[in-house]
Image (cartoon, helix red, strand yellow):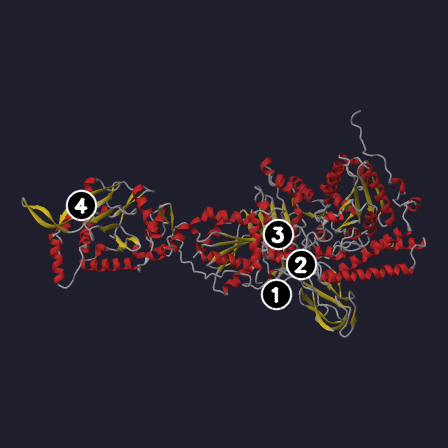
Amino acid sequence: MADVVQVVGTDDPVRPLFSEAGELRADARSGLGLDAAALRDLYQKMVLIRRADKEALNLQRQGELGLWGQYLGQEAIHVGAVAALEPTDWIFPSYREFGMAMCRGVDPAEMLTWFRGLSHGPWDPRKYAFAPLAVPVATQVPHAVGFAMGSKLRGDDDVVLGTFGDGATSKGDWHEAMNFAGVFRAPVILLCQNNHWAISVPLAKQTAGSIAERAPGYGFPGIRIDGNDVLGVFAAVRAAAERARRGDGPYLIEAMTYRMGAHTSSDDPTRYRLDSELQAWSAKDPIARYQSWLQGQGLLDEAAAAAIDGEAETMAEQMRTRLRAAVPAPAGEAIFGRVYERPPDPFTEEREEFEASLEGT
Amino acid sequence: MAEQTFRLPDLGEGLTEAQLVTWRVEEGGQVEVNEPLCDVETAKAVVVIPSPWAGTIQKLHARPGESVAVGSALVTIAAQGAPAPVEPLPAESVEATPSTLVGYGPGAGPPAGIRRRARVAPSTPQMGSDVRAAPFVRQLAKERGVDLAALTGSGPGGRITRADVEGAASPVAATSAAAAASTTDGERRISVVGIRKAIARQMVRSVTTIPQFTEFAVFDATKLLAARERQKQSGRSMTPLPYFILALVKAVRAFPLMNSSWDEAHDEIVVKQPINVGIAVNTSQGLLVPVLRGAERLDLMAIADQAARLIEGARAGTLKPVEMSGGTITITNVGASGPVETGTPIISPTECCVGAFGAIKPRPMVIDGKVVARSGAWISISVDHRIVDGALATEFLTALVGELETSRA
Amino acid sequence: MEPVTMARALNLSLRDALAGDEQVLVFGEDVGTLGGVFRITDGLQKTFGADRVFDTPLAESTIVGIAVGLALRGFRPVPEIQFDGFVYSAFDQIVSHVAKYRNRSGISLPITIRIPFGGHIGAVEHHSESPEAYFTHTAGLKVVAPATPGDAYGLLRSAIADPDPVIFFEPKARYYMKEEINPELEVPIGSARVAREGSGATIIAYGPTVSLALDAAGAAEKENISLEVIDLRSLSPLDMPTILTSLQKTHRAVVVHEAPVFGGFGGEIAARISDDGFDLLEAPVARVGGMDAPYPPSRYEKLYLPDVDRILEAVDIALAYG
């Protein structure tokens, strides 16, 4: 029979690491090969990006930012996924991945100029292998797949991480990208941050089935894991990346988490969300869980934790000071400067006219 | 310790105001950076506002339940060494204006008139909607100082054409554009502007659209000169021109078709009621044609006065556009200076006839079978053959000669 | 009646439409429980039930696609696109199906697609765009944009009642503008409004630029320049008689919109004036709009968007033609 359903790369190195419920198995946890410093580093990064998130919200309330989209509660995914990749593996984010960007070394004060309304693209994606934010939902997923196809065409061994939320899986772009990933066997890890909410629409009203289980329909494996366990995320992404690097194609990871904050600073979740749900998820807080695990392992004493907290405070203060001091580009440059590599004459004339009109203001 | 006032920011993409729900600090109390100041309710949510500075609360500017506009003072804090917030863009008025409908909407922009360049004195439009002219023609009329309302359009449906405006162009406006000349290899090129250009267009239009022919006659000016002499003795000197005009008017009254124009759009002849005589005048600006209006109602003296004023005005460049437009028939005195006997004048495109008078001088004439010397002059008329055939032209010319030869003072 | 905001007027209009016709359905992202990100649909689900006012998954293409199906089944769908910058994924459905369905089948689709549009709210990327020209260019659609609470109410009623598809652009920068409204007042599609009478030049605006044009007219008055302001309300069909009547008086037109000028809707207005009112003009039709660059970061939007100065500058030039 010619029409057999062919699952690309049926070999699944991720699933054996996890229980049915998506929890990282104890033996897998101990077999990650991370030394004490690396394990502490994961903790430190989660603390730092949470503090940055909190400070950004404060800055929005103080009128310093036009908007802020919190990732509170999703730190394990941001930190674990980036740590599992090579620094040269590109990441294609949506718009809530500032924690990931920080893990890639992007300066938080510089990043926030996006929310301050000073720049549409504050960092050089090539420098950090971190693509620009993508606000129109799911539109970055085809980019990730295309980039991965390109890596394969060039014979490079890098892989790509495309990340998105549960809401994105409703869009055609997502499905089309999944299909292409399967057809072209692209070396891409598709990481769903399932935080249960697309603004006010809960997961159950967003999708009637399982997101992870859609992967086989597109010809590659998928798994649902605990997204609030930084080591679980690390393990899943690393295994999927190794698999992709071997040439076995795409992998879908649905990391279950919860959006502890509002959709953005403009949103009011009390209109649609129950406190009880929030409390249940608070108990699964990724930082608290990991902190207690580290302490149990004897890898983090109180003094070390306090030092990290202090470091986070210093970072927040610097972030605040430096953001306020951010010098905006001249208007002509900000509006016209990056539109064309070879600007057409009428465009340049319009820019010059515009700049002339600003003189004397 | 610097006092700083924290103003309510736009908390949610375009909000204009928020209601103060409750204060979490009190006047005189201390506050740390990011410590909650108050709860406010916007159109979108209830949010906690954290303090941007550490310091002592000096003043709370709103009471619970009160509505606070975005940009209004919320709290004043005597801050401990905190730098004032850097506002990187050009300073804006942070006081919300009533016209600011959302966020920092248009009302809070730079005040009108600051960025505006090139203030141009606005002109009040005078154009009535009954004047039909294309934008270009209106612009041309403005450049040439022509009042469109005073023109009769020769285009379809009375539309004023470019030629109408050019025909009525004032010399003052026309000379404002300097003629630039350049020389190459022995030939000199003269940029044609103003009256020269207008004449060129008129003439081209005439000879390319009007099938015209010219008839000639010689008239005996004895009586005309005698009448002129009588005038002179009674203290009034005049050129022969008023006699020519008067004779022309009288002849036209007998042959109204000579005072008409051809409407190409409708294949109709438009016979004009008043006889407005255009007088070709050579000026330093070029040929101008001031118009003596309603000549059929004027006697010789009035014609003489008007003609003298118009010619003088044309030469001085003081005529109004209206005084150079609306002609129905034209006269040119080719013999006014020099030995020219006659010529073949070209019709103004909106008329049917043009007459040319040569120099009056003694010439041999046959009177009662004898050759005698009598004062006389050539006269020629060019007419639009679409309107007038040769026979009618001859009748008109005969009548005109008759009027000239019976001139009285 | 108390003055109401445009947001509230739209809410009342939807409420009255839902109450008046059982076939009216309101749906989109976050329109149900939350009441819409701008609260335009606030409380509608509670009053009319989750069958008639419902949240959809996050997928603009299919939000519009199901509107086609629902309309074929006899409903009057009123889908919401959450922000202007998110309508592009629904473009195929709107252009290929919503606009052409009647032409291909003889079946009318009484769909009203609501889209908040325009800038001036300090938002992040993709939340401040003015995509109206894409839709005015598409035959089979009617395109409207109110500028006041009263017109927002009446025009939305007319749009929902219309048998043909209507793209309903809401100027989000004016959502919190307040005025008294009269629900009895009919606002037909295709009729412009003279928002202010004047004689020196006519400013033609729609949606968010109408109050800007009025501000400009107010500023000009202090310089003894009298400006007439036309609020188009309806972009397609375009009310040319109102424009031409004004031009018979002023002979000068300045079109103002937030969208970039090149290829913008102002070009169509200018061309129509040239077609039908050539003789009336004493100056070229001026267009004032956004720069021909992508919508900038919000701190720069005031420099990018038309403002009173840019409008008056265009007026000055028009008047300088004499």
Name the amino acid, label 4.
Leu
Pick whichever of labels 3 and 2 is earlier in the sequence. Answer: 2
- Horizontal and vertical percent for residue B9? 69, 63
Tag 1 and tag 4 share a subunit? yes
- Measuring 83% from the left and 44% from the top, which residue is drawn there? A237
Viewer-proximal residue among B301 and A82: A82
How packed is label 2: few (under 14 Cα within 10 Å), some, or many (20 or more)? some
B153 left or right, relative to A333 = left
In the picture of the structure, the residue carrying the numbered disc 1 is B97
Q: Quote the CA–CA distance across marks 3 and 1.
A: 30 Å
In the picture of the structure, the residue carrying the numbered disc 4 is B397
- Horizontal and vertical percent for residue C273? 48, 49
The disc placed on residue A328 is 2
CB atoms at circles 3 and 2 under 8 Å apart? no
Name the amino acid, label 2.
Pro
Whether residue A62 is visible to the viewer of this picture, yes or no, is: yes
In the picture of the structure, the residue carrying the numbered disc 3 is A336
Q: Chain of mark 3?
A: A
Whether residue B59 is visible to the viewer of this picture, yes or no, is: no
Name the amino acid, label 3.
Phe
Q: Chain of mark 2?
A: A
Name the amino acid, label 1.
Thr
- Horizontal and vertical percent for residue A313? 81, 62
**Which residue is situated farthest in the left direction here?**
B369
Tag 2 and tag 4 share a subunit? no
Q: Chain of mark 1?
A: B
